[in-house]
Amino acid sequence: MSVRTLSASPVSGARIQANRLVESLAVFAGLFSLFSLLTAVFFWSEIPHLHSALLGPPEDNMQDFWNTWYVAVAKKPVGFFFTDLIRFPEGTPLYYHSFAYPKVFAVALLGKLFGAEASSLVFLHNISLLISFPLAGVGAFYLVRHLTANTAGALLGAFVFAFNPSHVEQTMHHAHVASIEFIPFFVLSYLVTLERRSLPLLLLTIVLYVLNALSCWYYFFYLAYFIAFHTLYVAIRDRAAPRGWALAAPIASLAGVVAILSPILVPMVMTAVGGAAVYAGGANDFVADVFAYLAFPPYHLFGPLARGIYQRLSGNDWEATVYLGLVNVAVMAWLYLTARHKDDRLLKYILYGLAVFCIFASGDWLHVLGHSTIPMPDAVLSRLPFFGNVRTPSRAIVFVYLFLAVGVGHAASVAGKRQQGRLSRWAMAVVAVAMVLDFFPARGFAVTPVACSPGLAVIRDDPETGFGVLDLPSLPIGTETTYNEGNFYMLQQAACHGRPIVQGNTSRDMVVSLRDHLETGDLQAQRRQLAAARVKYIVIRSQFPWHSEDGPQRMYPLVYQIAYDDGRLMVLRVY
């Protein structure tokens, strides 16, 4: 080898590295663009409303928008984790609230660049929801390709994970549960960390774990379940207890995420130990029913055929949606029949992973058409301190879809090796199209318009500071209807007037405030009570049914001064 060649080698090596980096970025951009286009196709009917309406029907999506507004716009004089903007005047802690932290802080940053007025904030909030689809697709692609070494299969698997029906449904209702984009990146990083025994990769794994936990506290637990599953599976497979790096990596991952999140976790634990009502029911209601795995979701082309099944399931439709896809199930059945007699380690790993997380998704009892049948491991976990906060077990279905995605990718790899020729390629293409159509939303989704009555400008433009607003009708302790009213009042606060409100919801109702002991039988006494609490305005909306427990509606305009009334919204002045 010549001196000239030797001297050129470092330059050539650097050039090769640069080319690889450019190529990797181009692949990432191409994948992101592909899945972004597919996201636009899935939500085509909602695209025109991204500036003026929230994705989904009026429910927890309104509370999610309040979360975005709180981080991006609202003042926080006593710190982030306590506010009197809701549950005024006492206020409420927010450690247990449903913030999707990476999303809301990203929107807050973008709001500083592009403006944080209501329409801009609505648009950024909606985009933060939709971006989880291409990001989840890219992450799942890299994971499936790593495990199967098949690009076509990785694309199919990425679609299955990113556009699974549960993800689509949760995007309409819960921003934190819909934040699945970091999960495949974490799993890939964790597996590669174990393979390469790399400390930098371990640190990356911990960071990704933190991002998942901050996106949704459920994922703090589900990723721990995955680590436990993988460690136990490898130990059984190899007939050897984990040791060395195989033991250090899972311990370090769990310890690292706990250490980093301790400023939030410690107050959460202390709040629970202090007796606050942080545990809520649902572990035997919001579950994955056996029949729901093959029941078409409501937005499916054949959704009406499964309406009778959904009516018998416990919980609500979006938490009960765990449809795996008839085409995907058929593909997995073909893979099992094809490879079951071989020493197919990946297939065994996939099947055990599917089974384990289906068990977690089943809740306290296995449900069959809404009926509890046999007890499940969650019955124990639900009674453990802190673990009891995982009150909606069906959300563990996200890992079922992840293993299903790997299974679909593995099936494509096996099919590609077994069959060659134009006919087999056409058959695989038909199956791929059928997969997409089986998950495609044939019906448009509902949206929640964000609009402000001119009457709320009276409250917004009042020069006084530090006063609160009472929204009626609303009960202190109530049904799903009054819960949604509370979310609506939060939306109106965030989009229209920005003043503290007596009502409002948090993920865990941990405090007693004015709304819980509001006088309603004697409106003169109520007026004195509100004035003492610096509640300056009452807003009454005719769009909601009046509750007798809120007092005599006809007496309110007689006791309080009318500041605005258009027949639909009345603003009353207390003092």
Image (cartoon, helix red, strand yellow):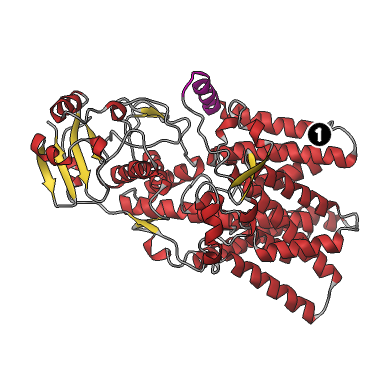
State the residue at coordinates (49%, 28%).
278
| Residue 131 seen in the current view | no
State the residue at coordinates (84%, 68%).
417
State the residue at coordinates (31%, 25%).
90
Tell me if mark 1 has few (under 14), some (14-19) or many (20+) residues whose alpha carbon lies within 10 angstroms of its own.
some
Where on the picture, by quarter, is residue 91? top left
Q: Amino acid at mark 1?
A: Trp
Outermost residue on the bottom side: it is 422
Question: How far across and how far down the image is residue 160, in percent?
Answer: 64, 60
On whether residue 32 falls in the magenta region, the answer is: no
Image position of 381 (left or right of 507):
right
Dominant SS type (magenta): helix
Question: How far across and how far down the image is residue 564, in percent?
Answer: 12, 46
Instruction: Say if 524 sits above or below 499 in the image.
Output: above
Q: Quadrant of the C terminus?
A: top left
Question: How far across and how far down the image is residue 163, in percent?
Answer: 58, 59
State the residue at coordinates (22%, 25%).
533
Look at the image and give the residue range highlighted in magenta. Answer: 263-276
Q: Quadrant of the N terminus?
A: bottom right
Instruction: Report the front residue among 557 and 138.
Output: 557
Q: Which residue carries the number 1 mark?
A: 245
Image position of 196 (left or right of 546):
right
Question: How far across and how far down the image is residue 260, in percent?
Answer: 59, 29
| Residue 269 seen in the current view | yes
Instruction: Report the front residue among 67 and 391.
Output: 391
On whether residue 265 falls in the magenta region, the answer is: yes
